[in-house]
């Protein structure tokens, strides 16, 4: 019988936890490496498959360690190759992950929460409210389950799916430690990014963690009043304090910060908005990602191509490195939260479905 208080989840255990587990079992230390190889490289879905462990040891693992992977509910492939997954968790909740291909590099976009409490005006996930935080094994599980479906390794990871990673910081950081650990998944350093709406304690915690993770900040407005209208979190952590925290973060880590700026037609896309953004960022080393918004939430639409070009030019002529994120997976509910929202409201949409 698994007792409630000491049931561990296989994908929620750090390497040291495996070492302790096998030490307690009187097993040699290399067992940790063997099990982690099955979990993180060979994509096992049960202890039963781990044939280089004795039957007795597999039985003890079954008894003492739970092993859950997210169950594939839906897998949609977009015309541009973006692939979107909807997973069902043990308690019946669903979350999304997205796989994107850029210049032959695969990037996995993971969710950190079921829903989100921050209620940004333009975001489908935000409109649906918050359900719960994801556990470590549910985030590691999204990544490994995607690799398993894909049949090849994914080498980049962003926390840019549903939810606010810095309202679930300890679980998110532990997932990253596991996926980066050389004896677990061994994800390359500098290949992980956390995107935050600007939760200052989380940014400070990341800086102090010493983890090699890139930081992306969803700014979306360079004016405090407008930002508060779009992102209510700006009332708790106002723009000026956010900027102060980013300066400190940069001093501590030396890392460039990615600034995400959603382009919302008629809302924040005028040349004046671009000049204000340039002014705000003048003392920070940044990459700027401009994201023409998806049309998921009523009242918001992307700017014209011309307005996008003008906005980008204002920044580029002031020396900023700017990328315009082309809309990806638009035909398969590309912005996170939309696939789940469509499922729960019973709407249907075109796209090739698998699984
Ligand atoms: N909560 C974190 C990370 C998840 S949101 C954050 O806000 O940064 C991930 C990204 O999805 C954010 O950059 C957000 O701006 C973007 N997003 C939300 N709604 C969108 C929409 N309608 N169109 C395009 N991107 C959207
Ligand atoms: Fe939450 Fe990010 Fe959506 Fe805002 S944009 S509601 S922070 S998921």
Image (spheres, rainbow, N blue to C red):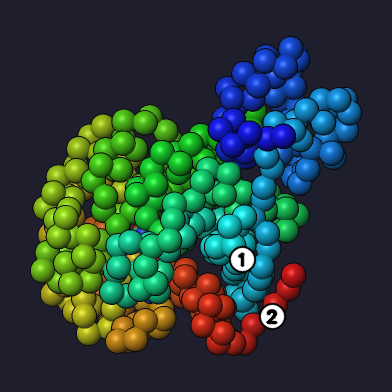
Mark 2: secondary structure: strand
Q: Residue at x 38, y 62 (%)?
A: 130
Image coordinates of residue 31 in percent, x first then y, are 75, 22
Bin the neighbour count of mark 2 within 10 Å (Cα to Cα): few under 14, some 14-19, many 20 and up: few
Looking at marks 2 and 1 on the same chain, the residue that comes earlier in the sequence is marked by: 1
Q: Is residue 209 left or right of residue 335?
A: left
Q: Is residue 34 left or right of residue 193?
A: right
Bin the neighbour count of mark 1 within 10 Å (Cα to Cα): few under 14, some 14-19, many 20 and up: many
Residue labelled with disc 2: 352
- Total count of labels: 2
Split into 4 quadrants, where in the image is the C terminus?
Answer: bottom right
Vertical placement of 69 versus 120: above or below?
above
Disc assigned to residue 113 = none
Vertical placement of 311 versus 61: above or below?
below
Mark 1: secondary structure: strand
Image coordinates of residue 153 in percent, x first then y, are 68, 49
| Residue mark closest to the camera, 2 vs 1 | 1
Split into 4 quadrants, where in the image is the N terminus?
Answer: top right
| Distance (Cα) linking label 2 and label 1 | 12 Å
Image coordinates of residue 321 in percent, x first then y, are 31, 58
Q: Residue at x 81, y 25 (%)?
A: 57
Of residues 323 and 133, the one drawn nearer to the viewer in this rendering: 133
Of residues 126 and 55, the one drawn nearer to the viewer in this rendering: 55
Check mark 2 vs ligand 1: CB closer than 8 Å? yes or no: no
Residue labelled with disc 1: 85
């Amino acid at each position: 019988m698994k007792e409630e208080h000491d049931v561990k989840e296989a994908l929620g255990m750090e390497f040291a936890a495996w070492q302790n587990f096998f030490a307690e079992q009187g097993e040699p230390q290399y067992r940790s490496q063997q099990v982690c190889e099955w979990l993180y490289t060979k994509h096992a879905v049960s202890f039963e498959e781990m044939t280089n462990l004795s039957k007795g040891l597999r039985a003890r693992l079954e008894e003492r360690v739970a092993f859950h992977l997210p169950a594939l509910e839906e897998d949609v492939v977009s015309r541009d190759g973006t692939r979107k997954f909807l997973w069902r968790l043990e308690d019946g909740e669903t979350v999304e992950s997205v796989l994107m291909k850029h210049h032959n590099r695969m990037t996995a976009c993971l969710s950190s929460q079921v829903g989100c409490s921050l209620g940004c005006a333009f975001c489908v996930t935000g409109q649906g409210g918050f359900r719960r935080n994801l556990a470590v094994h549910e985030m590691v599980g999204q990544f490994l389950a995607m690799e398993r479906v894909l049949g090849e390794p994914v080498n980049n990871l962003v926390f840019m799916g549903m939810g606010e990673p810095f309202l679930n910081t300890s679980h998110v950081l532990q997932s990253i430690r596991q996926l980066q650990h050389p004896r677990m998944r061994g994800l390359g350093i500098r290949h992980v990014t956390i995107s935050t709406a600007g939760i200052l304690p989380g940014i400070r915690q990341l800086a102090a963690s010493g983890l090699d993770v890139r930081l992306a900040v969803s700014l979306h407005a360079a004016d405090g009043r407008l930002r508060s209208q779009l992102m209510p979190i700006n009332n708790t952590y106002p723009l000026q304090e956010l900027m102060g925290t980013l300066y400190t973060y940069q001093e501590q880590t030396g890392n460039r910060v990615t600034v995400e700026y959603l382009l919302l037609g008629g809302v924040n896309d005028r040349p004046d908005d671009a000049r204000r953004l340039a002014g705000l960022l003048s003392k920070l080393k940044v990459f700027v990602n401009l994201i023409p918004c998806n049309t998921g939430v009523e009242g918001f639409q992307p700017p014209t191509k011309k307005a996008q070009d003008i906005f980008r030019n204002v920044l580029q002529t002031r020396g900023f490195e700017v990328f315009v994120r082309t809309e990806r997976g638009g035909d398969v509910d590309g912005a996170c939260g939309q696939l789940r929202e469509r499922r729960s409201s019973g709407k249907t949409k075109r796209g090739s479905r698998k699984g």
